[in-house]
Image (tube, rainbow, N blue to C red):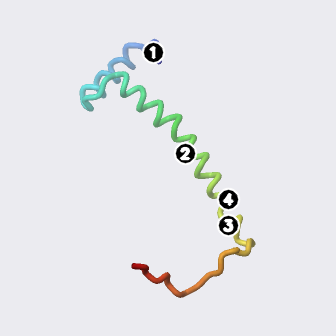
Amino acid sequence: MRTQITLNDEEVELLDRAAEASGASRSELIRRAIRSTYGSRRKEARMAALKRSAGSWRDVTSPVPTTSTPFAATS
């Protein structure tokens, strides 16, 4: 999808310096910035959900018997 944005002179200069230093295009740098800024929120939300669920199964009895005997290799 093509999107058009307006940047001021300072923003263009910053972007051009970063593009030259990294070898990436302006478009690629903008895509990376978007993923870095907004993609991390999704990751943070997933991590928070995982932390909230930690231990939620501690009171559930496992239907699978536990054993200290390792499985025998089959030939």
Quadrant for residue 26, please give it: top left
Amino acid identity at mark 3 = Gly
The residue tagged with tag 4: helix, strand or loop?
Answer: helix
**Cα distance, mark 4 to mark 2?**
15 Å
Marks 1/2 in contact by CB < 8 Å: the verdict is no
**Cα distance, mark 3 to mark 4?**
6 Å
The residue that mark 3 highlights is 55
Q: Is the residue 69 above or below the residue 16 in the image?
A: below
Amino acid identity at mark 2 = Lys
| Residue at the farthest bottom position | 69
- What residue is rendered at 32% in x and 19% in y? 13
- In the picture provided, is 16 more to the left or to the right than 53? left
Numbered tag placed on residue 43 in the rendering: 2
Quadrant for residue 32, please give it: top left
Q: Is the residue 32 above or below the residue 50 in the image?
A: above
The residue tagged with tag 3: helix, strand or loop?
Answer: loop
